[in-house]
């Protein structure tokens, strides 16, 4: 049943699974667009997701200090606790093209 909630008021079953997927999509979106400011409505439109689920996912991401609100819009949290680590290149990936140490 759509919109069912547990006794604690949490989303149940399928909706909880959707919420996890939407949180990942939002995190990926902001990792790819770190300087973009959007509202929940625009974000829902961009992701083609229901506004109420995007709003719920955004609340959780804000509670986890991944997103923050700037001037009434959502943005990537600029503190160390946010997704800033996704924007930092992995040193292991930077060495992929280094052939000086006997590579092919």
Image: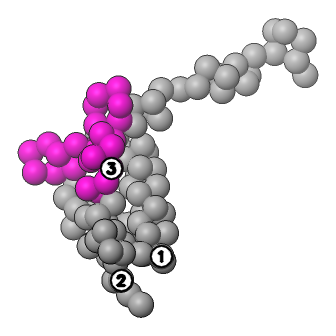
**Image coordinates for residue 8, horizontal then vertical, percent:** 31, 68
Tag 3 residue: 61
**Image coordinates for residue 80, horizontal then vertical, percent:** 35, 26
Judge by depth and name the residue closer to the eye, 7 or 61. Answer: 7
Picture colour scheme: one colour
Cα gap from disc 1 to disc 2, whole angstroms = 8 Å
Per the image, label 3 sits on a secondary structure element best described as: helix
* Disc marking residue 4: 2
- Which residue lies most toward the front here? 7
Q: Is 6 one of the magenta-colored residues?
A: no
Image quadrant in which you'd find residue 53:
bottom left
Cα gap from disc 3 to disc 2, whole angstroms = 22 Å
Task: Report whether residue 44 is seen.
Answer: no
Q: In the displayed structure, would residue 61 be above or below residue 90?
A: below
- Disc 1 crowd rating (10 Å Cα; few below 14, some 14-19, many 20+) is some
Residue range corresponding to the magenta coloring: 58-82
Q: In the displayed structure, would residue 35 be above or below residue 12?
A: above
Which image quadrant: the C terminus? top right
- Residue at 46% x, 55% y is 24
- Disc 3 crowd rating (10 Å Cα; few below 14, some 14-19, many 20+) is many
Mark 3 vs mark 2: in front: 2
Tag 1 residue: 13
Which image quadrant: the N terminus? bottom left
Q: In the displayed structure, would residue 97 be above or below residue 102?
A: below
């Amino acid at each position: 049943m759509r919109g069912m909630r547990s006794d604690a008021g949490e989303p149940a079953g399928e909706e909880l699974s959707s919420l996890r997927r939407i949180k990942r999509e939002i995190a990926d979106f902001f990792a790819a667009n770190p300087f973009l400011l959007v509202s929940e409505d625009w974000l829902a439109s961009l992701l083609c997701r229901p506004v109420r689920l995007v709003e719920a996912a955004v609340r959780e991401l804000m509670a986890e200090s991944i997103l923050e609100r700037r001037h009434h819009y959502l943005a990537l949290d600029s503190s160390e606790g946010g997704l800033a680590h996704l924007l930092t290149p992995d040193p292991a990936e930077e060495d992929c093209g280094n052939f000086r140490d006997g590579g092919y």
